[in-house]
Amino acid sequence: MPLPKSDTYTTDYIYSLPDGQRAELIDGVVYDMAPPNRIHQKLISKLNYTIADYIDKHNGSCEVYPAPFAVFLNEDDKTYVEPDISVICDKSKLTEAGCNGAPDFIIEVASPGSRKLDYGKKMILYSDAGVREYWIVDPSRERTTVYRFDEDAAPILFPFDQGITVGIYGDLQINIAEFLE
């Protein structure tokens, strides 16, 4: 949820936060980030490992980063996000600070506090920025919503027990239910 201030913020504000306090910045508005729960962290860990292992085994050029990892989608200093998983295939976008530009593939694990942001503002933000594929893994609804922006297709809902093919790879299939066993 946005912090109750009407000012427009920049990334300077994000970097001035005390250690351990995390927030995202979208169009100059600050969104406080609650600490993730155990299932959230388990899913991120398993997704990160699965994607990284696939990339390594296929001698891929993409790199995968779990949160906290800074993504600067715009050329201004008013948008800063930390997707749960970011896959970047264009290494020229990578700097010591994070990623400048749109990752190819983003995964967010929804929580009660982030659901509105993940399904609303972030979905639009990622689409407009040029993210090719966006997944919202929603443990409370036991489903994953998949947006394949590069195909200009409607979102697809997958129950956790159904395998999902990662669109940017074509031969990597992920079954979220297997991560929760």
Image: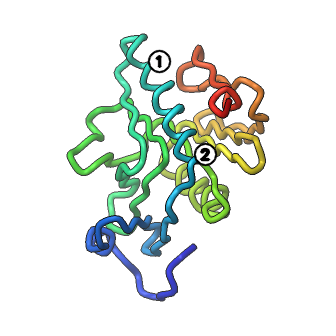
Q: Secondary structure at mark 2?
A: helix
Q: Quadrant of the image for the C terminus?
A: top right
Label 1, label 2: how far apart the Cα atoms are: 22 Å
Residue 90 horizontal side relative to residue 31, left or right: left
The amino acid type, in three-letter code, at marker 1 is: Tyr
Please state the horizontal and vertical placement of residue 46, each as a whole percent of the image. 53, 32
Give the residue at mark 2: 39
Furthest-top residue in this view: 58
Furthest-left residue in this view: 96
Residue 126 position (above or below residue 19):
above
In the rendered structure, find residue 7 and report the number of the disc placed on it: none
Please state the horizontal and vertical placement of residue 58, each as a whole percent of the image. 42, 11
Give the residue at mark 1: 54
Mark 1–mark 2 CB contact (< 8 Å): no
Q: Which quadrant of the structure image shows residue 102?
A: top left
The amino acid type, in three-letter code, at marker 2 is: Ile
